[in-house]
Image (spheres, rainbow, N blue to C red):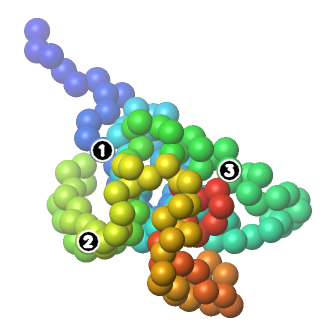
Amino acid sequence: MKNKKKNNDKIGSVLVIGGGIGGMQTSLDLVDSGFKVYLLEKKPNIGGVMAQLDKTFPTNDCSMCIMAPKLVEVGRNPNIEIITRAELERFEGEAGNFTATLRKHPQYMDPDKCTGCGLCAQSCPVELIDEYNEGLTLNNAISILYPQGV
């Protein structure tokens, strides 16, 4: 008798493009379904636009109260690899067998050594326009977008 692949066996991995609230939830759902997930985000932190909001419509809930547990779960899950400051350059293949080529932009720091303490941002002499605050302020060139950033 031949070994047949069961219908629910998971093979390979999944690339989720965009680390906003939708990308984070999709990554968590895929991991729960048994897949290895690569979460691709072009900015230095995941969280997307929801991280910039104070309250959400129509419930008027605190957006960070909704998002923070997902940030922690995504950041701690060993089956989710977060790839920040990168973009999809090429995508080729056929259904069930794709190859993605990514363009990774420099981090200027070692993410494996980062503890999130913020000391590097305090000593950074270069200031740039703060995109998170819609260009209204300046921010250090090395920093996280928001205090809870992953």
User: In this orientation, which residue lies closer to the viewer: 141 or 5?
Assistant: 141
Relative vertical location of residue 96 with respect to residue 127 in this rendering, above or below: above
Task: Decide: few, some or many residues near mark 3? Use Cα within 10 Å; few <14, some 14-19, many ≥20.
Answer: some
At 88% from the left and 62% from the top, the residue drawn is 60
Task: Decide: few, some or many residues near mark 1? Use Cα within 10 Å; few <14, some 14-19, many ≥20.
Answer: some
Residue assigned mark 3: 68
- Image position, residue 48 (x, y; %): 58, 67
Residue assigned mark 2: 103
User: In this orientation, which residue lies closer to the viewer: 25 or 78?
Assistant: 78
- Image position, residue 110 (x, y; %): 34, 57
Say which label, 1 or 3, has the lower sequence index: 1
Q: Is residue 38 visible to us here?
A: yes
CA gap, disc 1 to disc 3?
25 Å
Task: Decide: few, some or many residues near mark 2? Use Cα within 10 Å; few <14, some 14-19, many ≥20.
Answer: few
**Three-letter amino acid code at the position of disc 1:** Ser
- Image position, residue 52 (x, y; %): 69, 71
Q: Is residue 29 visible to us here?
A: no
Q: Secondary structure at mark 1?
A: strand
